[in-house]
Image (cartoon, rainbow, N blue to C red):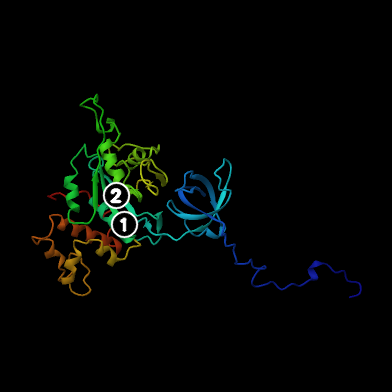
């Protein structure tokens, strides 16, 4: 051993099973953080408004702290921000805390997808935007929107656009017995427009009377606009806020709208009280309700709930459920003319939540014969 040369291979080190020295789990309290509202999210950058109720609100660009990487930050969120919050060009602040949310509007890709996607936070009104024509409104989408709104404890509003093209009264009769606010808007057409002009050549300007009614309805609320592509969500938002969100028409072949808005954005409404925001969202093709329990699905159909008291225990409320009282209820004189269609919609949703129907079958166009 006297003549042996020692090197680093002779050193035996037992590896630590716990790895290297763990980092402390203690984080700064950030008591000096400034509360801001998230108004837009774009590829890891968050646009926030600081002092939104003050005389000089500031727009600040932020990144998210590492400890929040598993928590989604969405438009409408109130967050704690540290760093440079002056809003000066080329400055960057950091979101270190998400304040408790009053409401959370969620959706899933379909009715069996366990992954929830948060659309917007802290909204108190969900405006379901549908067109009276071009594209044709769908009762299935409205029912899904009402379920999502009531599940999130948000007041639903149904807004029918393009009422100058078709009378929305037939569609709104579907909601006659429900506690749902409804409003119709129409476009202001040009006096010199050719009589033979197509639907997509007409002016997209919203009439001032329609805007005033909608502005009064949204005053003092945080409202999220949700609807299929091509119904006029972004057009309404531009008219209300003065923004320049991208708009598009309707495909003449498929009858569906073209996808234009790519991200949700919250905007203030001039001429309203402080705290009035509207959130424009991208058009959606499906509104999954995988996060809503079957019991909550049923409770959202408030016009049908009383009849379930006569159903046998454990009734699944399907068309072949023995003794289901819903079949007789919808044909009683006190039931609304839309009750049979509402029951059909409920059963489609229940079947979709159980994975018994293909994706998309739960959304149907306006049923014929609703009078």
- Single out the residue that lies furthest toward the right: 2
Residue 204, label in figure: none
Identify the residue shown where x is 80% and y is 67%: 8
Identify the residue shown where x is 26% and y is 28%: 190
Q: Which residue position is annotated with label 2?
A: 128
Q: Which residue position is annotated with label 1?
A: 149
**Residue 273 visible in image:** yes
Q: Position of residue 28 (x, y in %)?
A: 59, 62
Residue 115 versus residue 311 in the image, above or below = above
The one of 60 and 357 positioned closer to us in this rendering:
60
Q: Give left or right: position of 62 versus 177.
A: right
Q: On the image, which quarter does residue 231 sit in?
A: top left
- Sort mark 1 into few (<14), some (14-19) or many (20+) by Cα contacts within 10 Å: many
Q: Position of residue 300 (x, y in %)?
A: 26, 61
Q: Position of residue 359 (x, y in %)?
A: 30, 55
Q: Secondary structure at mark 2?
A: strand
What's the distance in space between the residues labelled 2 and 1, CA to CA?
Answer: 10 Å
- Single out the residue that lies furthest toward the left: 333
Identify the residue shown where x is 49% and y is 55%: 79
**Residue 254 visible in image:** no
Q: Secondary structure at mark 1?
A: helix
Identify the residue shown where x is 24% and y is 46%: 183
Q: Position of residue 17 (x, y in %)?
A: 65, 73
Q: Are marks 2 and 1 in contact (CB under 8 Å)?
A: yes
Residue 167 versus residue 288 in the image, above or below = above
The one of 137 and 236 positioned closer to us in this rendering:
236
Residue 235 versus residue 346 in the image, above or below = above
Quarter of the image with the N terminus is bottom right
């Amino acid at each position: 051993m006297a003549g042996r040369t020692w090197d680093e291979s002779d050193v035996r080190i037992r590896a630590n099973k716990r790895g290297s020295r763990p980092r402390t789990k203690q984080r700064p309290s950030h008591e000096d953080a400034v509360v801001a509202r998230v108004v837009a999210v774009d590829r890891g950058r968050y646009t926030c408004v600081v002092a939104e109720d003050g005389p000089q609100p500031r727009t600040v660009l932020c990144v998210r702290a590492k400890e929040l990487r598993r928590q989604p930050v969405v438009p409408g969120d109130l967050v704690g921000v540290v760093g440079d919050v002056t809003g000066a060009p080329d400055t960057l602040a950091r979101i270190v805390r998400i304040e408790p949310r009053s409401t959370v509007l969620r959706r899933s890709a379909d009715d069996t997808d366990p992954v929830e996607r948060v659309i917007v936070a802290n909204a108190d009104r969900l405006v379901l935007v549908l067109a009276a024509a071009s594209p044709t409104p769908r009762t299935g989408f409205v029912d899904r929107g009402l379920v999502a709104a009531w599940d999130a404890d948000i007041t639903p509003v149904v807004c029918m656009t393009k009422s100058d093209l078709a009378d929305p009264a037939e569609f709104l009769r579907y909601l006659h017995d429900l506690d749902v606010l409804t409003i119709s808007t129409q476009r202001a057409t040009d006096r010199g427009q050719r009589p033979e002009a197509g639907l997509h050549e007409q002016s997209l300007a919203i009439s001032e009377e329609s805007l005033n009614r909608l502005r009064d309805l949204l005053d003092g609320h945080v409202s999220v606009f949700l609807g299929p592509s091509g119904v006029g969500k972004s057009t309404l938002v531009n008219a209300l806020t003065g923004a320049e969100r991208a708009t598009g028409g309707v495909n003449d072949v498929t009858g569906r709208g073209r996808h234009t808005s790519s991200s949700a954005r919250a905007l203030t409404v001039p001429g309203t009280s402080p705290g009035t925001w509207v959130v424009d969202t991208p058009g959606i093709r499906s509104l999954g309700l995988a996060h809503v329990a079957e019991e909550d699905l049923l409770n959202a159909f408030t016009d049908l709930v009383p009849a379930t008291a006569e159903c046998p225990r454990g009734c699944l409320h399907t068309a072949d459920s023995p003794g289901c009282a819903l079949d007789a209820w919808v044909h009683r004189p006190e039931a609304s003319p839309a009750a049979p269609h509402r029951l059909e919609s409920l059963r489609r949703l229940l079947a979709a939540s159980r994975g018994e129907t293909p994706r998309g079958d739960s959304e149907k166009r306006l049923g014929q014969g609703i009078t």
